[in-house]
Amino acid sequence: MMIFKRLTIEDKEIFEKYIYPYKFLSCEYSFTTLYIWREACDICFTVYKDALIIKKMDFEGRYYFMQPLGYNKENLKELIDVLMDYKKENNMEFVFKDLDESFMEEIKDIYGDVRGICIKEDRDNFDYLYEAEKLTKLSGKKLHGKKNHYNSFIKNYNYEVKDIEETQVIKDVVMAAEKWYEANNNDRMLNFELQGIKDILENIEIVNTKGIAVYVDEKIVAFSLGEKLNDDLAVIHIEKADTSYSGVYSFINKAFVDRSFSDVKIINREQDLGIEGLRKSKLSYHPFKLEKKYIFSSSNIL
């Protein structure tokens, strides 16, 4: 029997023990990502037969499992069968979401064309991957517009960039996050994000998250939070800005990578969630790859 517990900050060591060996390109398998969204997605976990099993709820209220971590390949079918039974007993819509391509291949090897098995791409949750060097240099025709926006910001504003470390800077970021939330109609999911931002700032040294805040005339106008997941990859978890300052998003995008993640090759800027404006914005930076994620479901006849 699997007994799940709600994720807390104290569980960081357990999660990183299981996550680190995989070198995921996906943002989903980051303790910080999970911690930010633990309330919104009711994130719980258990360790079953030496594998970490994470249970989540998506933004539509549907529960599922993430990819098991630390499993023994010889026992993978047995583990998945147990999770499929749990799914059936608890009326879950999916068995798995947030799956990477290599794990999907393992599932295909096990189940093949078994009746009732459904595997599909989850386009709205594909992660956008960029070459870090291109984000910092903004060179070439494709990014010429972004470079112009960046240059416009640095020419027109009396700005200062500060690391999110000192108490006053953290207070300023919280204030800016609250203001941004209020300006966006107090959306329920954004409220969860706001609380996640506050939790990360409160525990910023524990979660090893970096951040910068941008000030214009001593007023905070933008901030960003991210982390290095491995030697090659960093993920940008949060990026907020006051768009009344022309070019501010182009500035903070470049400045954060340049200042905090210049030693990595790849920047993951997470998914677009199917939001048209967000998709257009992420595509405008010309990602070199969309990191695919998959959904795995089974009918109750199994």
Image (cartoon, rainbow, N blue to C red):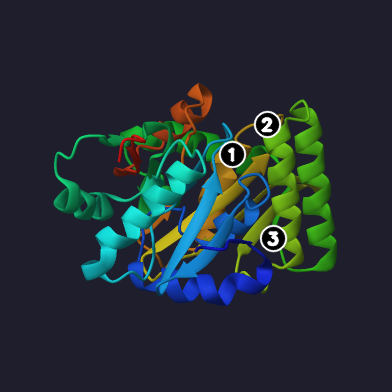
| Residue identified by numbered label 1 | 249
Q: Residue at x 72, y 68 (%)?
A: 203
Q: Residue at x 39, y 65 (%)?
A: 264
Question: Of circles 3 and 1, which is in front?
Answer: 3
Is 51 or 131 nearer to us in this picture?
Answer: 51
As measured in the structure, the alpha-carbon distance from the residue carrying label 2 to the one carrying label 1 is: 8 Å
As measured in the structure, the alpha-carbon distance from the residue carrying label 3 to the one carrying label 2 is: 24 Å
Disc nearer the start of the sequence (2/1): 2
Please give left or right for residue 277 compared with residue 242 in the image. left
Rendered image: mark on residue 78: none
Total numbered labels placed on residues in the image: 3
| Amino acid at the residue labelled 1 | Tyr
Q: Position of residue 62 (x, y in %)?
A: 53, 36
As measured in the structure, the alpha-carbon distance from the residue carrying label 3 to the one carrying label 1 is: 21 Å
Q: Quadrant of residue 294?
A: top left
Disc nearer the start of the sequence (3/2): 3
Disc nearer the start of the sequence (3/1): 3
- Asked whether the residues under the numbered discs 2 and 1 touch, taking CB atoms below 8 Å apart as contact, a structural biologist would say yes
Q: Quadrant of residue 18?
A: bottom left
Q: Residue at x 18, y 53 (%)?
A: 110
| Residue identified by numbered label 3 | 200
- Asked whether the residues under the numbered discs 3 and 1 touch, taking CB atoms below 8 Å apart as contact, a structural biologist would say no
Q: Quadrant of residue 141?
A: top left
Seen in the picture, residue 146 relative to 280 is either above or below; the reply is: below
| Amino acid at the residue labelled 2 | Thr
Question: Of circles 3 and 2, which is in front?
Answer: 3
| Amino acid at the residue labelled 3 | Ile
| Helix, strand or loop for disc 1 | helix
Q: Position of residue 270 (x, y in %)?
A: 47, 45
| Residue identified by numbered label 2 | 243
| Helix, strand or loop for disc 2 | loop
